Amino acid sequence: MKQTVTAMALALTATQAWADKAAVLDNYADIAQAAYEDSLTRAQDLQAAVDALLADPSAQTLTAARSAWIKARVPYQQTEAFRFGNPIVDDWEGKVNAWPLDEGLIDYVDASYGGATDENEYAALNVIATPTFTLSGQEIDATQITPALLADTLQEADAVEANVATGYHAIEFLLWGQDLNGTDHGAGDRPFTDFAAGEACTGGNCDRRGQYLQAATELLISDLGYMAGQWAEGGEARAAVMADEDAGIVAMLTGMGSLSYGEQAGERMKLGVMLNDPEEEHDCFSDNTHNSHYYDGLGIRNVYTGEYVRVDGRIVSGPSLSDLVAEADPAVDAALTADLNKTMIALGRIKTAAEAGFSYDQMLERGNEGGEALIMGAVDALIQQTKGIERAVAALGLEQIGFEGSDSLDDPNAVFQ
């Protein structure tokens, strides 16, 4: 009888653990769906603002379009924690958020930018001013700038990753123009007359610049709609994480750890400090990098806590990784939760300083000890929380996960070779 009770208890424990993992993964997929849906909604708001700008170019309509772009980044950046562990997201992400870009491919640039390079023959193509051109030996008709032209021909043209023709950063460049301030305060300052008609047009080809902006925005909406559908009921991304509970949990932790360590702490933050280069800013045209870093960090925390605040204030929440880790090892969960909170405080300091006028460009200036301290405080916090994520992996009895790395963290000398 005692053996029977023990067997039943073990069976119940195993069933409960399975149910807990399934519920955690279901909530994870719900959060992904909500965040991508919010990204789509904000992109539609951006499209309305772009249409208003092109219908009546003015300082006011340009400012409104820029504001809509910044708002659109808030939910999207929180989706980046779904990268690295979900192949469907990884295969798609470059369409909407690839950076840095050789902006001369798209439009006019300052003389200091230079021209074609050995690495990129099309770095200064300026498709807005060039209705026909030769690409990889093929004559291209670009008399109409369409979503298909951007996605199928220009994006990563000639297999060069810097030829970014689509997504948030192409739109950002068109709205702000180049930031020529170096490590001084100030973002890009494209005039609204770059979208004006007739003799009021500056920069030339204003009609084609408007076509490009509309096409890129339309494409962004299409791409975000696709990904929101992947996480909805019946979507492939949701089905993939639910198909194998342990693999799904690994995907969650892989996204957290890789974004935290190699991508954010390394490529997006420490590398810029090492090079003192504002071109390494994630949102370099708009000087919105402080927000991108903050909401990337929040996205990592969302995945662990199983909670996401939608743009309309509704909260999506449910069983979480934190719950699973707390059951396995309460001390590991408490430490990781504390680490995630410390990271948000450090990223919040950068955000607060930038909003008070100490821009991220200025923080990157060589010899600016205060700026370096702010950025490296967040880098150190991200590295510390990655160690906590590794301990969570061990607590859950999962095989060691290889997180994305960065030379800036793993082999600093290689950065200068």
Image (cartoon, grey):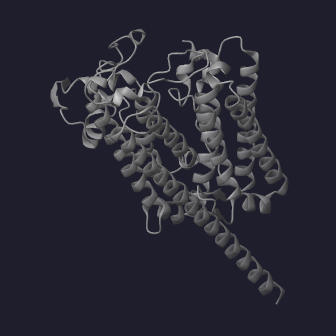
Q: Residue at x 60, y 40 (%)?
A: 259
Q: Is residue 151 left or right of residue 300?
A: left
Q: Is residue 259 visible?
A: yes
Q: Position of residue 272 (x, y in %)?
A: 60, 21
Quadrant location, the C terminus: top right
Q: Nearer the viewer, residue 141 or 119?
A: 141
Q: Nearer the viewer, residue 100 or 136?
A: 100
Q: Residue at x 61, y 42 (%)?
A: 296
Q: Position of residue 105 (x, y in %)?
A: 33, 24
Q: Residue at x 70, y 74 (%)?
A: 16
Q: Nearer the viewer, residue 287 or 234?
A: 287
| Quarter of the image where one finds residue 342 | top right
Q: Is residue 161 visible?
A: no
Q: Residue at x 61, y 34 (%)?
A: 264
Quadrant location, the N terminus: bottom right
The image shows residue 401, relative to residue 293, as above or below, that is below
Q: How many marks?
A: 0
The image shows residue 70, relative to residue 25, as above or below, that is above
Q: Nearer the viewer, residue 47 or 239?
A: 47
Q: Position of residue 289 (x, y in %)?
A: 59, 32
Q: Position of residue 11 (x, y in %)?
A: 71, 78
| Quarter of the image where one finds residue 358 | top right
